[in-house]
Amino acid sequence: MPESERSEDRLAQEAQVIVGGGTVTTARTLTFVSYYILSIPEMQEKLRNELQDTMATYPQSIPSWADLERLPYLQAIIKEDCRGARQTHLSDTSSGPSRLVYVQVAFMLCGEKVPVGMCSYFMHTDPAVFPEPRKFIPERWLGDYDPKMNRNFVAFGRGSRSCLGMK
């Protein structure tokens, strides 16, 4: 940032954006994941069973992040929520147009099409990569799944525009 733009007001605004970006997105993610867990009894039961051993001594001892990261169903729920929480969410009840048009911009390099940009909504709702993309299906992230899912998973952005919290 050039020295001329480093006023106290500008720096305060930048700080608000960073703090707001981290808290608002986390709150939205927790809201949606809580909704799905509470509204789908089978998911709630499956998650409860997976958490049982890890949480057995809670609140006397709190499981580490590493302990929680080893729980595949919990990780699948979080990943599926991140796939959808950045969108208008996975509902079909929007007031907008019933059909979105995807225009891919690319250029030719050595005879291959190279994408110029990406949109997380289209990356996360591509039915060729995520069958039934508008449904919340954490199981899609379990077992042997299509590696294209990882390629299309851009919940935190990529490259120079990725989430600051990932750095």
Image: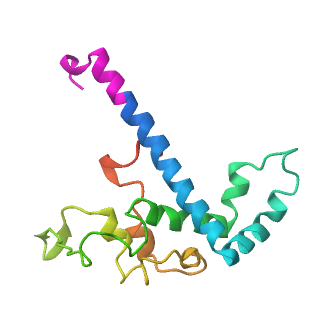
Is 15 on the left-hand or right-hand side of 54?
left
| Segment colored magenta | 1-14
Vertical order, 44 against 161 (above or below): below
State the residue in front, 92 or 53: 92
Vertical order, 23 against 88 (above or below): above
Q: Is residue 146 magenta?
A: no
Residue drawn at (39%, 30%) of the image: 16
Q: How is colour applied across the structure in the image?
A: rainbow
State the image quarter where residue 155 is shown: bottom left
Is 92 on the left-hand or right-hand side of 61?
left
Q: Does the magenta stretch include residue 9?
A: yes
Residue drawn at (43%, 71%) of the image: 90
Residue drawn at (51%, 64%) of the image: 81
State the image quarter where residue 50 is shown: bottom right
State the residue in front, 127 or 31: 31
Residue drawn at (43%, 83%) of the image: 132
Vertical order, 18 against 58 (above or below): above
Quadrant of the snapshot with the C terminus? top left
Question: Can residue 17 be seen?
Answer: yes
- Residue 165: x and y in percent read 46, 43
- Residue 108: x and y in percent read 11, 71
The rendered magenta stretch, by its main secondary structure, is classed as helix
Quadrant of the snapshot with the N terminus? top left
